[in-house]
Image (tube, grey):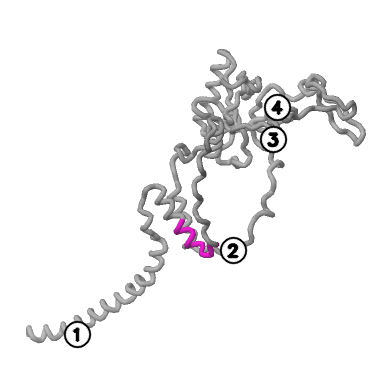
């Protein structure tokens, strides 16, 4: 069970939902220490006062703001806690919006909100079900770690999740990063869509969606522990030459996607391009057909009088 990061309440109009905030994610990365390679001694970071030139304990350390080059003013945690912010102990819901209206680049870490006791159970369920039925998410403000933040509330498996969000002015403008305008053909776009279809899946679960780097590090550490050689790295495929033909690269990617799914990679379906090639032939045939029909009609018209004369 993860530890409580923050305790407060969700403020939903006049409804208050006391909650505990717990981390919704885990970090499974392998951690390393800094060591002195000569004798494997730990290398530690020590906190030293630059005026007294001595190491200080955590109890002696506080916050300070650099007012001028030569002056730092102290800021106490108690002063920050007593700031007149309504979001200091509450997650204040400001609005409800469609989830599609939120740019994913603004969404940060996720946290589970646990109802704080039986008194919070009913308003918690009320907010959860209202969010589910409205198919919307709530945008809220809350204050953590000395600053006010923007948040997003949604429902996951009957639990309300709080995502930290970035303010609008924290998102950099990507205009200067856009490439120069280049021409892309319809056939290339169609083949790219074909590749997207081949790589489309219903979920992100499966053996190919695991952290293979961490697994490899753990195998290496296990081998070192047992004084044996770590597993050999697989041979890397030969790097392909510089691809000039974008369409050729797309075709090859589609073939590899088929192969990875156990499909026949030798079949190169290009319905869009094939149709484009055959279209002129169909148009030509369409133009010739009326001519043949017209000729047939003329022949019929000429023979009709002769038949009448014979019958007479």
**Percent position of residue 69, x then y:** 90, 36
78, 132: nearer the viewer:
78
Asked if disc 2 and disc 1 are in contact, CB closer than 8 Å, the reply is no
Q: Which residue is mark 3?
A: 37
Q: Alpha carbon of mark 2 to alpha carbon of mark 3: how far?
A: 52 Å
Q: Which residue is mark 4?
A: 144
Label placed on residue 229:
none
Secondary structure of the residue carrying numbered label 1: helix
Q: Residue at x 91, y 32 (%)?
A: 71
**Alpha carbon distance from label 3 to label 1:** 106 Å
Residue 245 covered by magenta stretch: yes
Residue at mark 4 to residue at mark 1: CA–CA distance: 96 Å
- The quadrant where residue 244 appears: bottom right
Characterize the local packing of mark 1: few (<14), some (14-19) or many (20 or more) Cα atoms within 10 angstroms: few
Q: Is residue 213 left or right of residue 168?
A: left
Disc nearer the start of the sequence (2/1): 2
Name above or below for residue 286 compared with residue 72.
Answer: below
Instruction: Look at the picture and state if 181 lies above or below 7.
Output: below
In-front residue for pair 301/291: 291
Label 2's element?
loop
Magenta segment, prevailing SS (helix, strand or loop): helix
Numbered range of the magenta stretch: 242-252
Between disc 3 and disc 4, whose residue precedes? 3
Residue bearing the label numbered 1: 302
Residue carrying label 2: 182
Q: Gap in Å between the C-alphas at discs 2 and 4?
A: 46 Å
Q: CA distance from mark 3 to mark 4?
A: 40 Å
The answer to whether mark 2 and mark 4 are in CB contact below 8 A is no
Specify the quadrant that holds the C terminus: bottom left
């Amino acid at each position: 069970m993860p530890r409580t990061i923050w305790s407060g309440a969700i403020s939903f109009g006049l409804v208050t939902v006391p909650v505990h905030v717990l981390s919704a994610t885990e970090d499974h990365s392998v951690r390393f220490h800094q060591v002195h390679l000569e004798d494997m001694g730990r290398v530690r970071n020590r906190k030293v006062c630059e005026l007294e030139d001595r190491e200080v304990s955590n109890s002696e350390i506080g916050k300070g703001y650099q007012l001028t080059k030569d002056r730092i003013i102290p800021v106490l945690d108690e002063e920050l806690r007593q700031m007149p912010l309504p979001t200091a102990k509450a997650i204040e819901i400001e609005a409800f919006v469609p989830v599609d209206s939120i740019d994913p680049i603004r969404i940060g870490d996720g946290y589970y909100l646990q109802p704080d006791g039986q008194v919070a159970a009913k308003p918690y369920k009320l907010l959860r079900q209202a969010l589910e039925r409205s198919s919307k998410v709530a945008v809220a403000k809350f204050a953590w770690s000395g600053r006010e933040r923007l948040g997003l509330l949604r429902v996951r498996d009957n639990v309300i999740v709080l995502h930290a969000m970035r303010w609008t002015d924290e998102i950099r403008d990507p205009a200067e990063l856009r490439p120069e305008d280049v021409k892309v053909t319809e056939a290339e776009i169609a083949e790219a869509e074909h590749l997207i279809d081949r790589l489309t899946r219903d979920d992100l679960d499966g053996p190919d969606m695991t952290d293979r780097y961490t697994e490899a590090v753990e195998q290496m550490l296990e081998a070192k522990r047992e004084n044996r050689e770590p597993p050999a790295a697989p041979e890397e495929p030969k790097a392909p030459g510089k691809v000039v033909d974008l369409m050729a690269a797309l075709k090859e990617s589609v073939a590899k996607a088929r192969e990875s799914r156990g499909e026949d990679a030798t079949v190169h379906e290009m319905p869009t391009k094939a149709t484009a090639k055959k279209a002129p032939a169909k148009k030509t045939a369409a133009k010739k057909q009326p001519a043949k029909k017209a000729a047939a009609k003329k022949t019929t018209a000429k023979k009709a009088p002769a038949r009448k004369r014979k019958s007479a």
